[in-house]
Image (spheres, helix red, strand yellow):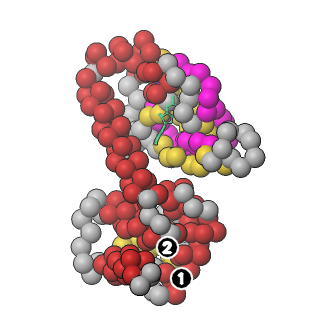
Amino acid sequence: MTPTVDSDLEQFAQEVPAGTVLFREGERGNVMYVVHRGEIELRRQVGATAGYPGSSERVLAVVTPGQFFGEMALLKDRPRSATAVVRHDARLLVIGATTLEAMLRARPEIALRIITTLTDRIENANQQIELLLLPSPNHRVVQCLRQFANEELAGQVAPGIAILVRKSARDLADRTGLSVAEVQEVLARLAAAQLVVPAEDTSRSGYLIPEVGQLSEFLEFLQLRDRYRQL
Ligand code: CMP
């Protein structure tokens, strides 16, 4: 559901075309944004000093209607922690510190929403840490698919139910810290073993997992194989 913009917030609304860079990582910033329409991609340099050989950009998150971003620089007077690029034409509310304070005083439920979003981000970061600690691309992709499957069903994964994970190889690469090519290699192996079926038609693109339990068994197999490899 698209949220409505209160008429008193209308004055802060801006239409921004796809491709616009709202701000870059490292810049100073004194506004935050609430997405009313469109999508914003948050990208961060990883691997080496930004802009130097060896560094590459990873998508941290995609912000969709009803969500916000850019609050860190605003609240902590720190440089932007990521670059924000408009993915699809967007309508944004651009909010400065004074307006934010007034909004929080007038509508405390906004503070609750901010806390919930920050909690989601911590959960996401914890999941990423879990993936980065796994030893091989196989482990990471399988575990990442299980995480996505859980998110699709809001944690209600049940045995015997096929789950369509509506993510691309790029999404898996961003979460696992692997390259798209590495992810595709693992997905091809999983597809050959029929643990995952690529779903290509446009309305249902992603990866179908016929049985999440089998994916879990495969992960256990990988872990056991690693444990006894030295024997
Ligand atoms: P700011 O640092 O001002 O600019 C970049 C924004 O990206 C940041 O505020 C947050 O709103 C957002 N951001 C930073 N890290 C993450 C993350 N791990 N997940 C989602 N959003 C993030």
Decide: few, some or many residues near mark 1? Use Cα within 10 Å; few <14, some 14-19, many ≥20: few
> Residue reaching furthest right?
53
- The Cα–Cα distance between marks 2 and 1, rounded to whole angstroms, is 9 Å
- Disc number at residue 156? none
Main SS type for the magenta part? Answer: strand
Task: Tell me: is circle 1 under 8 Å from ligand 1.
Answer: no
Decide: few, some or many residues near mark 2? Use Cα within 10 Å; few <14, some 14-19, many ≥20: many
Tell me, yes or no, whether the highlighted magenta stretch contains residue 27: yes
Question: In the rendering, at what x and y percent does residue 198 appear?
Answer: 51, 77
Report the span colored magenta: 18-45
Which residue carries the number 1 mark?
189
Question: In the rendering, at what x and y percent does residue 165 appear?
Answer: 42, 67
Q: Are marks 2 and 1 in contact (CB under 8 Å)?
A: yes
Question: In the rendering, at what x and y percent does residue 118 appear?
Answer: 35, 37
164 vs 5: above or below: below
Amino acid type, residue under disc 2 in the picture: Asn
For label 1, the SS is helix
> Does 114 sit left or right of 43 as displayed?
left
**Marks 2 and 1, the one that precedes in the sequence:** 2
Residue drawn at 50 percent across, 30 percent down: 70
Q: Quadrant of residue 107?
A: top left
- In this view of the protein, which residue sits in the foreground, 96 or 140? 140
**Residue 11, can we see it?**
no
> Does 230 sit left or right of 103 as displayed?
right
